[in-house]
Image: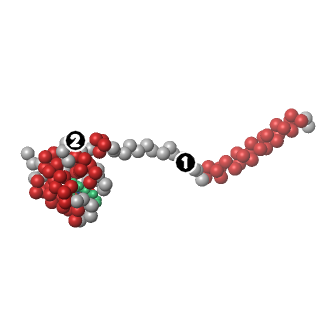
């Protein structure tokens, strides 16, 4: 047997071995997915239209849900917004100072108040 034929047979044998073990590898597929890019809202992107108090509501009312969650509500009266903010503080334990709560109610009454 010539040297090159032996090399070719050996290569074929190796390829066969590798091919034979391929199904075992395929049985446990390891799927690597690219890390998704997450665009965290920042600054004005946070969703509350800029204006007096928008910074206060942005920093107090986006820890648990989006700004949209608040803004997509129907327009409410000042008393109703007051009740919502109160509920966030008492029922859901939002750590909001009474002073910030007042600023937030003012903001919501202006931006999403009843016409
Ligand atoms: C500690 C977490 C937390 C914070 C901070 C928070 N919320 Fe909420 N909020 C919730 C939960 C929980 C719900 C009820 C679940 C839902 O509706 O998906 C909710 C629901 C709401 C709703 C939907 C209507 C309703 O009455 O349920 C509005 C509007 C809202 N929040 C506004 C606000 C505003 C304004 C602030 C800032 C003053 C705020 N949230 C801060 C947890 C929070």
Going from N to C along the chain, the mark reached first, 1 or 2, is 1
Residue at the right extreme?
1
Label 2 CA crowd tier, 10 Å (few <14, some 14–19, many 20+): some
Question: Where 91 sits versus 107, above or below?
Answer: below
Disc 1 secondary structure class: loop
Give the Cα distance between marks 1 and 2.
43 Å
Q: Which residue is under mark 1? A: 31
Quarter holding the C terminus is top left
Left or right of 21? Residue 54 is: left
From the viewer's perspective, is the residue at label 1 or at label 2 nearer? 2
Label 1 CA crowd tier, 10 Å (few <14, some 14–19, many 20+): few
**Visible in this render: residue 75?**
no
Left or right of 95? Residue 106 is: left
Left or right of 82? Residue 21 is: right
* Ligand 1 within 8 angstroms of badge 2 C-beta: no
Q: Are marks 1 and 2 in contact (CB under 8 Å)?
A: no
Write the residue at 62% across / 49% down. 26
Coloration mode: secondary structure
Write the residue at 23% across / 62% down. 89
**Visible in this render: residue 7?**
yes
Q: State the residue in front, 58 or 115.
A: 58
Write the residue at 51% across / 45% down. 33
Label for residue 50?
Answer: 2
Write the residue at 74% across / 47% down. 17
Disc 2 secondary structure class: loop
Rendered location of residue 35, percent (x, y): 48, 45
Residue at the bottom extreme?
90
Question: Where 6 sits versus 60, above or below?
Answer: above
Rendered location of residue 58, percent (x, y): 26, 49
In which quadrant of this rendering is ligand 1 seen? bottom left
Quarter holding the N terminus is top right
Q: State the residue in front, 109 or 3.
A: 109
């Amino acid at each position: 047997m010539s040297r090159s034929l032996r090399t070719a047979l050996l290569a074929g044998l190796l390829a066969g071995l590798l091919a034979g073990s391929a199904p075992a590898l395929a049985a446990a597929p390891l799927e690597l997915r690219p890390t998704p890019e997450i665009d965290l809202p920042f600054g004005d992107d946070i969703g509350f239209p800029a204006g007096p108090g928008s910074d206060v509501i942005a920093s107090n009312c986006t820890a648990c849900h989006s700004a949209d969650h608040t803004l997509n509500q129907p327009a409410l009266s000042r008393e109703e917004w007051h009740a919502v903010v109160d509920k966030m503080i008492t029922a859901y334990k939002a750590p909001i100072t009474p002073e910030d709560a007042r600023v937030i109610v003012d903001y919501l009454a202006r931006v999403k108040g009843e016409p």
